[in-house]
Amino acid sequence: MADIGFIGVGNMGRPMAANLVKAGHAVTVFDPVADAARAAEAAGCRRAADVAEAARGRAIVLTMLPSGAEVREVYLGEGGVLTAARPGDLLVDCSTIDVATAREVSEAAARAGMAMLDAPVSGGVRGAAAATLTFMVGGEAEAVARAEPILLAMGKTVVHAGGSGNGQAAKICNNMILGASMIVVAEAFALADRLGLERQKLYDIASKSSGQCWALTVNCPAPGPVPAAPSSNGFRPGFTAAMMLKDLRLAQAAALATGTPTPIGAEAAALYGLLCAAGHGGLDFSAVFLMVSGEEA
Ligand code: NAD
């Protein structure tokens, strides 16, 4: 059993913290939103009054925060994790943030004698609840080995992606593939509709042909062929269009910083930007189908 600090218990963090409790760990949480902290308390966590109390004296401190700005504040700010934790402590940020901030915070942790990992996840709220998340981890191998048993109480797969920041790099590259492939699958179904090709026929053929991909077979953007997909359930997420836009913009920032031409990734970011501006940011990201088909939600 480990004494764990968990900072940021929103949609993802709360079920993750709850799974740590279920695995027999002592979990102390902090979240400035009282309802979020209370929900974690109801799941068996202890509540801390601030970041420092959640981080002080723990074997491991986990964070699950909205973006790089909050990660910077929680780790580097006054009363932050780096002032409360001790040399030798293990810090794991599971948020999806920009690579540069992940590396900067991890370097500051290393200067303070602490091991830090970036460990963003794939699997969404459902994966967090079911403890089936995939963790993409950047940092030193020794720290990854220390963190692995804790991460496996919240997920099924831990992949060491390389040095600091590489977990975030893996996450944004994966989601750039996903965001772009979802758009072209949506376009294919919209085109099929106009050509008089039944959606189910396109699904049956493409899912067994070279067009096969996750966006088609699991999260099909056209309502009908996959009854469990968000598209067949009013586009209820799932993974929201707003989250996809966030990840695509992180990918674009990284592409700009490294001078990598990513025209399809850029176009995908622009299209999800339009979808969100049209008021659909809270729908599943497969709702991009509404935009390309002209259908109503
Ligand atoms: P969320 O907004 O529901 O939760 C974030 C929590 O952090 C909130 O409860 C908020 O109050 C808290 N917080 C903000 N500032 C804080 C601070 N200074 N100190 C302590 N807590 C603070 O977001 P989420 O959906 O849980 O996502 C968290 C992260 O996981 C994001 O980076 C997101 O991109 C990533 N992610 C989300 C999903 C998903 O499906 N929701 C999937 C994969 C990855």
Image (tube, helix red, strand yellow):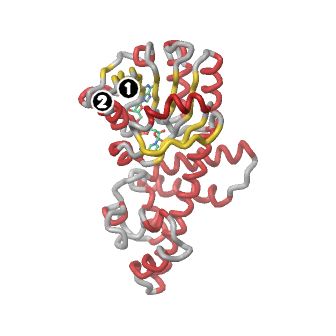
As drawn, which residue projects farthest toward the left? 42
**How far apart, in angstroms, are the residues tagged by discs 2 and 1?**
9 Å
Report if the CB atoms under discs 2 and 1 are less than 8 Å apart: yes
Q: Which residue is drawn at 39% across and 23% down?
A: 2
Position of the C terminus, as image quadrant, is: bottom left
Estimate how packed mark 1 is, as few (under 14), some (14 to 19) or many (20 or more) residues with alpha carbons within 10 Å.
Answer: many
Position of the N terminus, as image quadrant, is: top left
Q: Residue at x 33, y 32 (%)?
A: 23
Q: Which mark is residue 40?
A: 2
Q: Which mark is residue 18?
A: none
Queried on whether the Cβ of the residue with tag 1 lies below 8 angstroms from ligand 1, the answer reads yes
Of circles 2 and 1, the one toward us is: 2
> Which residue, given by chain and number where applicable, does mark 1 sit on?
31
Image coordinates of residue 293 in percent, x first then y, are 45, 72
Q: Quadrant of ligand 1?
A: top left
Residue 282 vertical position relative to residue 146 in the rendered view, above or below:
below
Image coordinates of residue 135 in percent, x first then y, are 50, 42
